[in-house]
Every structure is written in C-alpha cells, then in structure tokens.
Image (cartoon, helix red, strand yellow):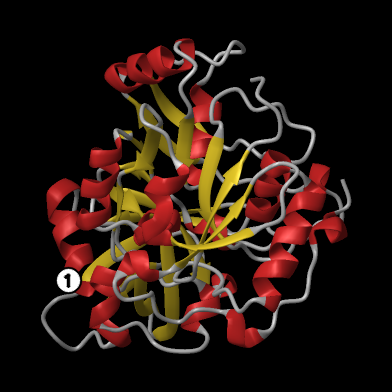
Amino acid sequence: MRVDLFDFELPEDRIALRPAEPRDASRLLVSKPGQAPLDAVFSDLPEFLEPGDVLVFNDTKVIPAQLRGVRHRGEATAHIDATLHMRLSPDSWLAFARPGKRLAVGDRVQFGHDSNVCFMGTLNATVAEKRESGEVRLDFELSGAALDEALHTVGHIPLPPYIAARRPEDVRDRADYQTIYADEEGAVAAPTAGLHFTQNLFERLNARGVERCFVTLHVGAGTFLPVKADDTDDHHMHSETGRVSGEVAEKLNRAHAEGRRIVAVGTTSLRLLESAAREDGNLAEWAGSTDIFITPGYRFKTADALITNFHLPRSTLFMLVSAFAGMERMRTAYEHAIESGYRFYSYGDGSLLFRDGNER
C-alpha cells in the first residue's frame, strides 16, 4: 500500500511533553463501528468494558538505554550517541549509533554521563559488527547483572525523538516513562498505552469484574523509526523479543471459547498476541522474536478491542490501528482528536478502539 495514504497534518502544539496528572485524568476517545467518536476520560474506562472482559498488558520495563560517550581510535576521538534496542547475549546489544559513519569494527567506545569520561562511572564497549541497516553490535566489558547495573548508572531514559527534540530528559521521566506494573527489564521504549493506568483504576476494573493478564514484549527503538519507503511492501520492521506464558495462553483461550472479549492494552500487546496465535486464534506458550508488520487487509485472530495512544503520521503504528478499526474510521477519529485538542504520542491521551465485525 502507498505510505502517503497514512499521512495527516498534526499541529505541533498537540504533541504532549508531559503526561497527565494523575495518569488516568488523560482523555479517552472511544471508537465503535458505525458510531461517531465519543469523548471520555481515561478513568471512565470501566464503563466501556463488560464483566469477564480480559485486558492484556505488556509488563516490559524500560531501561536507561540511551548512551553518550567517546570513540577512541588511536589518538583520534569522536563523540557518539547510541540507543540500545535488542539484547543479543549477556554482554552484547544491537544499537542505533549516531553518527554511525564515525564507527568501525574494532573501535572502542567509552560511555558516561554527557560524554564526560573523566570521572568514575564509565562503561566500555567494542564495536563488534556494523550492519547494512545502520545498526552496530556493541560488546561490553561487563556482562549480565553487572552490565544492567552499569546501564542504570551511565544511561539515560530514551525519550521518543519528538519529545527529546523539544526538551531534555530529566528525573521525572524515570518514573513518568514507566507503567506502574512494569516488571521485566529490557525495553528501550515504553508500552505507552499502559501509562494511563493507576492503582485506583485497577481497583475499579476489579470491581467491574474485568480480568487482566500480562505478556512481555521488549519494545525496541525501531518503533520510532519513520517509514521512509513509498510503499509498505518495501519497509523493514526491526525484530523485538517477547513471551506469552502457558498460563496466560490458557486464560485467553478460555475467554475466547466463552465469547468474552479480549482487549489488548497497546499495539505491543496486540502484535505479540498476533505473533503467537494460531490460525484459529488460540494461543500456546510462546517465546521468541517477532517483526510482524500489520497493515490494512490483515485478518486479526485475537483481540476484540485495542487501547492505544495517538500515533505519528506515516508510522507503522498508525497503519496497525487503521488495519484494526478501518482506515476511514481512523481518519475520522484522528480528525476529531486534532480538532478537539487531544494530546498525541507517548505522553498523550488514549483511545479505545473496537474492532470492525465480531468474527476472528
């Protein structure tokens, strides 16, 4: 499909730079087939769900994966920024490096706060590989838990480019850019639909009889990459690793068999479910990597509804929601959101999208 079909104009002042306080005070746009968009508040979510519905959350936890450092090559040095996006081994990560042209295989990079390598608390790595896609493989001198601890010392929270371009990361982002249920470390981007949930909202969902379960997909920095191709067939998705436990698979299969609705919280949860599902929509224990790319025409096998934020024009995420709820309905919803002052992107408002049709 032509990528320009997914383009739209977004005023810059619609980009949220901070989350709502409290988190569930953000706005919620509800979109159902054949109905005009409905305006609500995210704390109203239980009113739009039924007892027995199952919310599927992504419990990945964001790590400080933005590194700043200095490349050493003999007497020559150069400043390097690296964003880790996929762990390959206990001591090795794939990363997007800038400027990549300043790196060669064998180079040593010393990472530390703001590239200041004259203090205690630095992290050394060697460029082990450069890939055609622009990624580099970094082999660190530390491994496992020791590497994780060092990343928390020298790393920065990798804010999305559309926020980082307008303000620096600060101490608030360490909490703001993390869901309250984050548990499994490994993401370099937050599953942002989950940022709206509070403990109070969880309690109200419990009272409503809405169930919840957790899967894990470690979101990579590739989620922020623009689609540069003119046709979706020419776009390459970066892989992300994830896991669906046997217990969760059984719970969702039971809900499916009983005709209860499955509600994916975020595009990451939905992509993982679709990657793990069989053709009949049933799930089994699953672990691995996925580069699934969902565009209009895709036949969904799992979720009946999707909770998600408002996405970038021409992005793979806007393509996914257009596939889920229909291109015309999404265009109408986004036009309404822009005209009504909804806040967009990672720290922005949310939407609840019910899928076209009842079949899976």
Q: Position of residue 19 (x, y in %)?
A: 38, 75
- In this orientation, does residue 203 appear? yes
Which residue is at the front of the view, 222 or 193?
Answer: 193
Left or right relative to 85: residue 2: right
Q: Residue at x 54, y 30 (%)?
A: 303
Q: Residue at x 55, y 77 (%)?
A: 162
Q: Quadrant of residue 134?
A: bottom right
Examine the rendered structure and indicate whether residue 127 appears above or below residue 10.
above
Which quadrant would the C terminus be assigned to in this image? top right
Examine the rendered structure and indicate whether residue 230 appears above or below residue 17.
above
Q: How many marks?
A: 1
Which residue is at the front of the view, 198 or 296?
Answer: 198
Secondary structure of the residue carrying tag 1 is helix
Q: Position of residue 305 (x, y in %)?
A: 55, 38
Q: Quadrant of residue 49?
A: top left
Left or right relative to 188: residue 336: right
Examine the rendered structure and indicate whether residue 356 appears above or below residue 236.
above
Q: Residue at x 26, y 67 (%)?
A: 124
Examine the rendered structure and indicate whether residue 230 appears above or below residue 1.
below
Q: Position of residue 47 (x, y in %)?
A: 42, 47
User: Mark 1: few, some, or many residues within 10 Å (few <14, many ≥20)?
Assistant: some
- In this orientation, does residue 86 appear? no
Which quadrant would the N terminus be assigned to in this image? top right
Amino acid identity at mark 1: Thr
Which residue is at the front of the view, 129 or 40?
Answer: 40
Q: Position of residue 125 (x, y in %)?
A: 31, 62
Q: Which residue is mark 1?
A: 153
